[in-house]
Image (cartoon, rainbow, N blue to C red):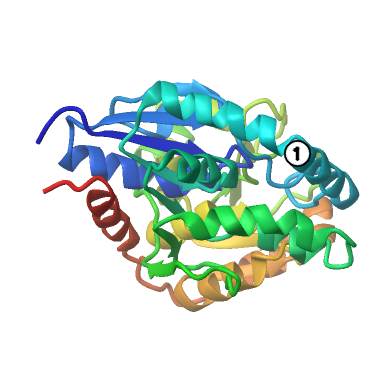
Amino acid sequence: MPAAHHLYIALSGHGFGHLAQVAPVLNAFQYRWPRVQVTVQSGLPETVLRQRMTGRFECVAGVADFGMVMVDALAAKVSESLAAYRVFHQDWQQRLAWQERQLQAAVPDGILADIPYLTLAAATRLGIPSLAMCSLNWADILAGYCADAPDLAELRAPMLSAYNSARAFLLPAPSMPMPDLQNTQNVGPIAALGQDRRAEIHHRLALSDGDTLVLIGLGGVDMRPPLDAWPTLPGVRWLVPPGWQVRRPDMVDWAQLNDYSMLDLIRSCDVLLTKPGYGAFTEAACNGTSVLYVARDDWPEEPWLSRWLVAHGNAVKIDRRQLASGDLAEPLGSLLAQPAKPPVIPTGIADVVAGLERLLDLG
């Protein structure tokens, strides 16, 4: 195989779910094809990318999409997002020219986009074969929030055109329906697997036998509940994100376990407290971890994520009031009483790797 093969990945920086989809695919792909050159374009910090992507790749700092403007991890700023899309599309030709320059400088043989449509549009103009992959697309997310916008069809037109221009739009289970795309292909779930470090964590945190360890991870958009006012739940220990500065004996900062990956923590805990999101749900289900998740009913993708998780994993939904008050004894007890389901196998990784091999014509 010639060393000249070059894969260009355009990665959305809207939260960490897009990275959670791409990273295990890229890691598996590079294990099979270590000589393929890889470039990753994203607005996410390079340090975050390299925590999840283990092979060699070049970074291009560039934001090709923004998704939705968020209040916090759960709520979108709808009017601000609509205004941002109008500005984005008013400058469409300039943005497209910028993306074309990035691609012309890289000279890739193929592109994987999760899910910047600007990159797919530029790839089409330059004649570079491309794949899209995601459990959602921004055209349908925008329509879910802004169905009454008078210019919705005008805004969605270049988005849908770009998504449809890819050789295929791969939909990892679970994905929202995308009726306006003609090139969708279903693939299996995608998730990276961690190592079970529970015995070591048990010792380091001096847990008691029978303690329930709950990891709080609300995704890539920060939102800190008022943990200081939560009631103490007997037998429950909480792992909280670094920087939250909680001073309670039942709550431990992740920084004390910074030699473990986030995936190791997910696999080693009894429960993940999170918001609906592709990465959190599939990683929990594939690592055999139960999920307590906060209602996010306005997010258009949420119903399909939640139905899949309830069907394939162990999960209980709570509302924002319960999150704020810490009134979690009943839902947590209900979750822990569920018969444990076997971990889901992330078969979508191999599905997408095969698609990339066809895209780059690798023998």
Q: Can residue 249 be seen in this view?
A: yes
Q: In this view, does 14 lie to the left or right of 358?
A: right
Nearest the eye: 326 or 274: 274
> Can residue 211 be seen here?
no
- Image quadrant holding the N terminus, namely top left
Identify the residue position indicated by label 1 in the image.
88
In the rendered image, residue 105, in percent from the top left (x then y), is placed at: 42, 21
Report x, y in % for residue 357.
Answer: 22, 50
| Residue 350 sits above or below residue 101 on the image | below
At x 56%, y 52%, the residue is 162
Left or right of residue 103: residue 323? right
- From the viewer's perspective, tell me whether residue 325 is left or right of residue 359: right
Which sits in the foreground, 344 or 235? Answer: 344
Q: What residue type is labelled 1?
A: Phe
Q: Measured along the vertical axis of the image, is residue 86 above or below residue 247?
A: below
Can you say whether 246 is above or below 29 in the image? above
Residue, x 40% and y 73% (percent of image)? Answer: 341
Q: In the visual, does 124 lie left or right of 253?
A: left
Q: Could you say where residue 45 lies in the image, as x and y percent from the top left?
A: 55, 24
Q: In which quarter of the image is residue 330?
A: bottom right
Q: How many labels does the image show?
A: 1
Who's the residue at 75% across and 39% down the image? 88
Count residues near mark 1 (Cα–Cα under 10 Å), then give few for <14, some for 14-19, many for 20+. Answer: some
* Residue 284 percent location from the top left of the image: 47, 57
Query: Callout 1: helix, strand or loop?
Result: helix
261 or 94, nearer to the observer? 94
Image point (42%, 72%), residue name:
340
Q: Which of the 4 image quarters holds residue 302? A: bottom right
